[in-house]
Image: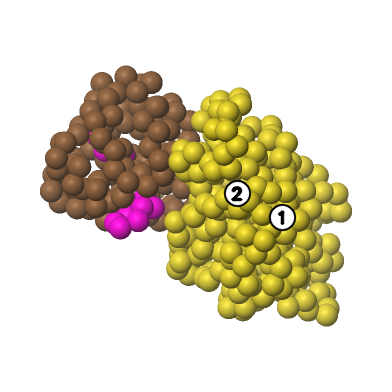
Amino acid sequence: MARVLVADDAAFMRKMVGDALTKGGHEVVGEAGNGVEGVAQYQALKPEVTTLDITMPEKDGLAALKEIIALDPAARIVMCSALGQESKVLESIKAGAKDFVVKPFQPDRVIEAVGKALG
Amino acid sequence: MERRLLLVGILEMFAPGQVQAGDIAVLEAGASPLAGLPFPAVATNVSYVDGVTGGNVFVMTLEGARRVAAAMMGASEPEPAADGSVELTELEASAVSEAMNQMMATAAGAISTVLGTEVEIGTPETRTFVSEAEADGAYPASPHMVRAAFSVCGEPCRLVQLVPNAFVVRMDRALDELGAETVPGAGAAAASASPAAAVQSPHGAPSLAGIPVRVWAELGRASMPTADVVGLPQGAVVELDRAPDEPIDLFVNGRRFATGRLVVVDSDWAVRIESVLDLSSNSSDIEGEVARWPVSS
């Protein structure tokens, strides 16, 4: 079980990811609706795993990932991408993301990615 | 056509077995994307913000939107609406927006392949319209509009592509450039194959026979997660799905049109065609044979 922060601008996706994580025995400790909130929540909550949507207003997931890794190089982050965002996914992995899930995804895939991030 | 298959694929993931593709029509300039649809209707628009201009509007009946949202959340039926309410709940609106977001991300990826540049989409915006009068003028007039009809969860819906002239010019140029990469000597085979006739210039070229098309041969395919691709070291062996004695595939502008054998002609690779496929039927198994970019819809 891990304490997880979920960042996605879509309330529906936060619910989907949150429900999947709860089903997998994890605890959603916080939600963020954009990258700026994501970075702030990360600092405040110190979650064990953070999921970041790539496309978010204010600050996108890639920029938020880089800030979080700069603050905490050991941060465990899973990216959520839509189809067609392969180059951003690659950049995220290079920037330190542990795994990624591609939308639309099955709940088990989210649990698996978080499990992989936890090592 | 190919793009519509991609979009149906996305919708199918949200509402399995409940999506049917309908006709595709070109709308008159200045027409409302919502004209003729039962109201109240829910419309989600997403614009391209980088790479190209224009956008798309996905329109459904209110009931259709509720059913799609319910299907996306794993429920068989939508929650009963508050008395007479014609507004989606925040979660329902978010679900519908997300469906459109993922369809548009796929479309942007396909356009990006043609243009050879990143194409970014903006944030989806979902609105409910109670009457055609209210919807009139809600979206900027567009010189070109293409409407693809669907049925989702038993309710009519449509995807309308809003195409500014700048978009047409860019796609036209990119398709021309792709055509310029035609393999020398393969033109005769391509010209005799019928898919060339399906490739229409957005400007409606009077003769299609002279349009150069891109022809390539495929030895085999492999599928692996992106993470594995990134980690491939020099010297790694990627296994393909084809035995050495099997024929290889020939594609024209993304569509498989023949199979043949790899041979050597004047010290260059060449393909001897063994069979030309029947492309006149719109069989449902063509999805895997179609490269993922739109041939003008």
Discs 2, 1: same chain: yes
Q: Chain of mark 2?
A: B
Give x and y (percent) for residue A31. 29, 38
Q: Residue at x 82, y 75 (%)?
A: B209
Give x and y (percent) for residue B69. 55, 36
Nearer the observer: mark 2 or 1; the answer is: 2
Q: Residue at x 69, y 49 (%)?
A: B39
* Chain A display color: brown
Asked if the residue under mark 1 is in contact with the one under mark 2, i.e. CB atoms within 8 Å, the reply is no
Mark 1, secondary structure of its residue: strand
Location of mark 1 (residue): B148
Q: Is residue B278 above or below residue B245?
A: below
Location of mark 2 (residue): B42
| Labels 2 and 1: the sequence-earlier one | 2
- The amino acid pointed to by label 2 is Val
Q: Residue at x 51, y 68 (%)?
A: B116
Residue B168 painted magenta: no
Q: Nearer the viewer, residue B247 or B253?
A: B253
Colour yellow, chain: B
Give x and y (percent) for residue A112. 37, 28
Neighbours of disc 2 within 10 Å: few (<14), some (14-19), many (20+): many
- The amino acid pointed to by label 1 is Ala
Q: Residue at x 64, y 72 (%)?
A: B142
**Viewer can see residue B231:** no
Left or right of A24, for residue B152: right
**Viewer can see residue B18:** yes
Q: Chain of mark 1?
A: B
Q: Nearer the viewer, residue A28 or B218?
A: A28
Instruction: Indicate the quadrant containing the N terminus of chain A: top left, top right, bottom left or bottom right.
Output: top left
- Which stretch is magenta? A49-62
Q: Is residue B205 above or below residue B288?
A: below
Left or right of A62, for residue A12: right
